[in-house]
Amino acid sequence: MASSVEVNQRIARLSAHLYPSNLQMEDSSSAVRRADCRAKGGAPGFKVAILGAAGGIGQPLAMLMKMNPLVSVLHLYDVVNAPGVTADISHMDTGAVVRGFLGQAQLDNALTGIDLVIIPAGVPRKPGMTRDDLFKINAGIVRTLCEGIARCCPRAIVNLISNPVNSTVPIAAEVFKKAGTYDPKRLLGVTMLDVVRANTFVAEVLGLDPREVDVPVVGGHSGVTILPLLSQVKPPCSFTREETEYLTDRIQNGGTEVVEAKAGAGSATLSMAYAAVKFADACLRGLRGDAGVVECSFVASQVTELPFFATKVRLGRNGAEEVYQLGPLNEYERVGLEKAKKELAGSIEKGVSFIRK
Ligand SMILES: NC(=O)c1ccc[n+]([C@@H]2O[C@H](COP(=O)([O-])OP(=O)(O)OC[C@H]3O[C@@H](n4cnc5c(N)ncnc54)[C@H](O)[C@@H]3O)[C@@H](O)[C@H]2O)c1
């Protein structure tokens, strides 16, 4: 049998592993110190990292991922406040083990061994700011984080939330190409919030439970590039011209609705965290090998002449294993598609040339 000294040494080693030095929080005043406690590893599952975990989206996203039974280890990385968020979330009595990482020097540790990386790092839109105004700041942040992914977990699935998604996904692709690690199936732009909003707003108009409604939203993730396919809504239904215009406009400008209502206090964070978790959970179910996991995402695509486009994709062990075609569009949607493609082409090019310049 191990002596108590050996046991204490073992526990101290385990504790140091679980809590990187700057996050170690010892309470010397209490009789039982953390180093004296037994730490059971998390339940079997996937290792997930959130980059930007202390932000408006990052915090509720971290909380919801800690509640996800498919997650065994949750790494929370940010350039500020990661220790506080980590300590807080780590007290939840769910299976996932939570570790915090603060600042660039700990990025590689945050990413090593990770299966799924979710990126909500960046600055959000302020009133009067378009998504493209965010470009310069967020493009640099996404580049740095993706360089870390290429170094430390090149096989991870990446869920990119940072705006403008229409440009940050091409930026990430270019970074991975440069590093020689690019796998188009593993890079997914998160457009789930557009789908979540579309389901909600359509359900309101139809008087249905939003959980019963499925609206495909294709194109991209900004203004007119967000194209809800109301002709393909499930359950099958029809809309008047007024309803179609109202719904399309509200879905395309849902982000602005929140930015204006928050009046300077940020953009969508809670609904975004919900949408990000819904999407991440679908990715994890795909990784686990579940059949028939289908969600919309902005990915490398041959559905149109553009190199990236959002459509429904089938998620599997390798990420977006199948990218679905658009299906039949009505005249209103065909016009919308042309507008969306025109704007998307510019945003994609902007992202690509940010890295290639
Ligand atoms: N895809 C979508 O549907 C969608 C929806 C809403 C918001 N967004 C975008 O998500 C991003 C985050 O929004 P938010 O409201 O949470 O913003 P926020 O400012 O509240 O949080 C951003 C977090 O990122 C962190 N950060 C900044 N630079 C970093 C770096 N180099 N490495 C790691 N972390 C870093 C910040 O410290 C902060 O904690 C924004 O770009 C926003 O536009 C996307």
Image (cartoon, rainbow, N blue to C red):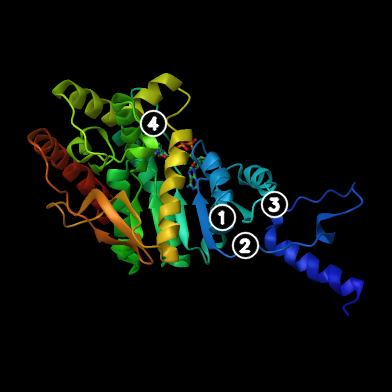
Labels 2 and 1: the sequence-earlier one = 2
| Quadrant housing the N terminus | bottom right
Determine the CA span between mark 4 and mark 2: 37 Å
Residue at the spot of label 4: 125
| Quarter of the rendering containing residue 264 | top left
Residue 111 in the image: above or below residue 102: below
Ligand 1: give its quadrant: top left
Q: Which of the 4 quarters of the picture holds residue 315?
A: bottom left
Label 1: which residue? Answer: 69
Give how far apart the Cα atoms at labels 4 and 3 are.
Answer: 31 Å
Q: Secondary structure at mark 2?
A: loop
Between discs 4 and 3, the one toward the N terminus: 3
Which sits in the foreground, 312 or 188? Answer: 312
CB within 8 Å, label 2 to label 1: yes
Rounded to the nearest angstrom, the CA distance separating label 2 from label 1 is: 8 Å
Q: Earlier in the sequence, mark 3 or mark 1?
A: 3
SS state under label 1: loop
**Does the numbered disc 4 mark a residue whose Cβ is under 8 Å from ligand 1?**
yes
Q: Which mark is residue 23?
A: 3
Amino acid found under the numbered disc labelled 2? Ala
> Which residue is denoted by mark 2 in the rendering?
43
